Amino acid sequence: MSALLEAIRDEADVFVGLRREIHRHPELAFQEHRTAALVADRLAEWGYTVARGVGGTGVVGTLKRGSGPRRLGLRADMDALPIDEATGRDWSSENAGVMHACGHDGHTAMLLAAAHHLATRGRFSGTLNLVFQPAEEGGGGALRMMSDGLFDRHPCDAIFAMHNMPGIAQGRLVLREGAAMASSDYATITLTGAGGHGAMPHKATDAVVAAASIVMALQTIVSRNIDPLQMAVITVGALRAGKANNVIPASATLEISVRSLDREVRATLERRIKSLVTAQAESFGVRAEIDWRPGYAVLVNTPAETAFAREVALELLGPERVTLQGPALTASEDFAFMLERVPGSYVLIGNGDGEHAGACMVHNPGYDFNDDNLAVGAAYWVLLAERFLRAEGDTATR
Ligand SMILES: [Zn+2]
Ligand SMILES: [Zn+2]
């Protein structure tokens, strides 16, 4: 274990307390007022220049040291989920129906622990931007911060983020170059025909039959229009039509979600879904309206920054606790938008596996962030910052 990790482990207790304090007071997307105030107050106390209210409830802490020209961004998310907590922990949520079930309390605390260490003992030269974003869980807080001028006001040459992952050994770091997390898009398809008596189908235009045909036809897009070596998912998650067995309903509605790991595949899926639905509906004499709602983009880790992050992880933990190229995930993450603007890399940190409590999956009422990761995550951030913003003449290993 590196000396840096040991030093941070010695000071981790206070941040475990802080993590549990945040856990006790979870807040939903764009309502992270208490959490944002806690973050901003701490950063200001430690000497950071603090921008509050960026993109709603986002916070950016900036620390400039020396004359280094490089500018680094490190990002954590702060929001919780609408889930009733069932962990039974002493630090369980005090906000009924709201819970930190994705570990964003831990991400925030890890970055704060690193912020403290870097402010008091960090050896770096350059500009450090710590980005605490709201609303990762579907709200698109990253985009909101960006449209509020995040990177214009706080330019970054590279940006990095971290997420815990149950099912992976505690503290293991998993990196990946290239597409790492899926895009997610949504559509509501409304089919309108003409209702009628169930006994006289020839006098109606049946939206149900059209909907059924479209459900089946949609699945041919993945099997016939997408390269078999590429990932694509089209899921019809809801199909609503009719109320009675002897009435042909006038309309039917489909709710679909669409995922991919490639920007071109994503565009092909959208184009094919729209044309197939329109043509299928027309063939049944039914009108189709498609409300297409783009969600998060494909998260693509850039090669140079991923290579750099791998070196940092290896220096900190050694090869036995680092996966250099992990598998891609079909989940989505709005850090993808930041990576469309600034190069960088997203790393996973194992929350625990096997029988360990940390193996409970995120978004589950029994999930809790693994506090043993606070020191590991914070040490990774500190070392990454010190290596990226290497002070002149600093050749020391840590
Ligand atoms: Zn989540
Ligand atoms: Zn999350």
Image (spheres, rainbow, N blue to C red):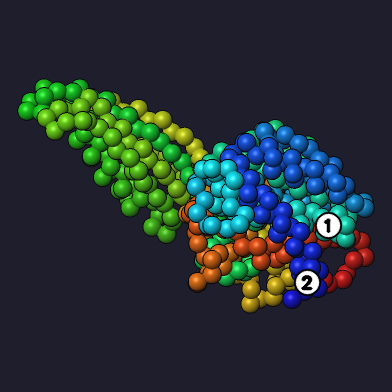
Q: Residues within 10 Å of mark 2 (few under 14, many from 20)?
A: some
Residue type at mark 2?
Answer: Glu
Q: Nearer the viewer, residue 32 or 203?
A: 32
Which residue is tagged 2? 6
Q: Nearer the viewer, residue 241 or 109?
A: 109
In terms of image quadrants, where is residue 51? top right
- Looking at the image, can residue 203 be seen? yes
As helix, strand or loop, the secondary structure at mark 1 comes to helix
Q: Indicate the quadrant containing the C terminus: top left, top right, bottom left or bottom right.
A: bottom right
Q: Position of residue 57 (x, y in %)?
A: 68, 36
The total number of labels drawn is 2
Q: Residues within 10 Å of mark 1 (few under 14, many from 20)?
A: many
Picture layout, residue 234 above or below residue 253: below
Q: Position of residue 144 (x, y in %)?
A: 64, 35
Q: Position of residue 118 (x, y in %)?
A: 83, 57
Residue at left 76%, top 48%?
A: 130
Q: Indicate the quadrant containing the N terminus: top left, top right, bottom left or bottom right.
A: bottom right
Q: Position of residue 83 (x, y in %)?
A: 50, 46
Residue at left 46%, top 41%?
A: 185
Q: CA distance from mark 1 to mark 2?
A: 15 Å
Picture layout, residue 356 above or below residue 159: below
Q: Nearer the viewer, residue 394 or 30?
A: 30
Picture layout, residue 150 above or below residue 114: above
As helix, strand or loop, the secondary structure at mark 2 comes to helix
In terms of image quadrants, where is residue 239? top left
In terms of image quadrants, where is residue 132? top right
Give the label, 1 or 2, closer to the camera. Answer: 2
- Return the mark for residue 259: none
- Looking at the image, can residue 379 be seen? no
- Return the mark for residue 118: 1
Residue at left 93%, top 53%?
A: 66
